[in-house]
Amino acid sequence: MYLVDDLFPGLCDLNGEDFPHFPDRSSPWSILSASDNGLVSQLSSIEGANNGIFIHPDARIGECVRIEGPCYIGSKAEVRHSAYLRAGSWICEEAVVGHSSEVKNSVLLPGSKAPHFNYVGDSILGIGVNIGAGVKLSNVRNDRKEVTIKLANGERLGTGLRKLGALIGDGSQLGCNVVTNPGTIIAPSSMISPNETISGWFDAKS
């Protein structure tokens, strides 16, 4: 079983081109790299983009939104007032980027939500994930060294990345003002109480 399948099992039930291709299913963070198969590269090859920005006709874009290419905004996605989508943002079908939320080099898989005052940097939000108001997914270590990740079995791996936020499994819910440290992995259907700081591998089912 690959880590992509462990964290985002709902991907196997999806059809179409609304979500990115994971070049290495054992290392889902590799999609966030600057490689030829990385997120920015995939976004740059999408047909129908305007100056590197693709917005589906069914998407809803609020006022005072800033969007930088390359970027993808899927069907029925919603980008609300004063949101900031930086390069490498892939916002899938029915996902929400809310008021004053910032997304950078990240994937919001279908139905995931960063609805209120959130920072999502170099991260992947699984299908149906919701992060509460004020949640920050930190993506850079204070010492600027390579970000490592911790697997469920306790093994630690280097990622080769100096910027990596969180990988949040399908259906997980993060309470208000949660902060995840760089390289955090959250198992599917996890529930995190407000005001927590999370590191490493986290698995707390509802």
Image: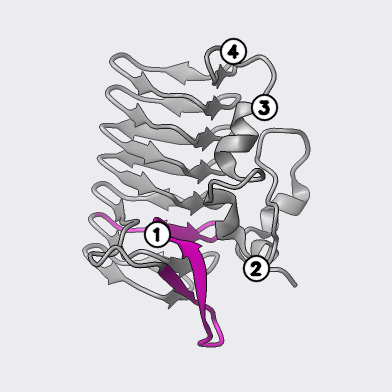
Above or below, 59 relative to 138: above
Which comes before the other along the chain, label 1 or label 3? 3
Tag 2 residue: 3
Residue 112 counted in the magenta span: no
User: Is residue 55 something that shows in the picture?
Assistant: yes
Marks 3 and 4 close (CB-CB < 8 Å)? no
Marks 2 and 1 close (CB-CB < 8 Å)? no
Choose mark 4 or mark 1, whichever is in front: 1
Q: Secondary structure at mark 3?
A: loop
What's the amino acid at mark 3? Ser
Tag 1 residue: 162
Residue name at image x 47 percent, y 18 percent: 60
Which comes before the other along the chain, label 3 or label 4? 3
Q: Quadrant of the N terminus?
A: bottom right
Q: Which mark is residue 57?
A: 4
Which comes before the other along the chain, label 2 or label 1? 2
The stretch in magenta equals: 147-176
Residue name at image x 50 percent, y 51 percent: 125
Residue 151 counted in the magenta span: yes
Q: Which mark is residue 45?
A: 3
Picture quadrant where residue 48 is located: top right
Which comes before the other along the chain, label 4 or label 1? 4
Compute the Cα span from label 2 to label 3: 26 Å
Q: Secondary structure at mark 1?
A: loop
User: As drawn, which residue projects farthest toward the bottom?
Assistant: 154
Compute the Cα span from label 1 to label 3: 25 Å
What's the amino acid at mark 2? Leu
Choose mark 2 or mark 4, whichever is in front: 2
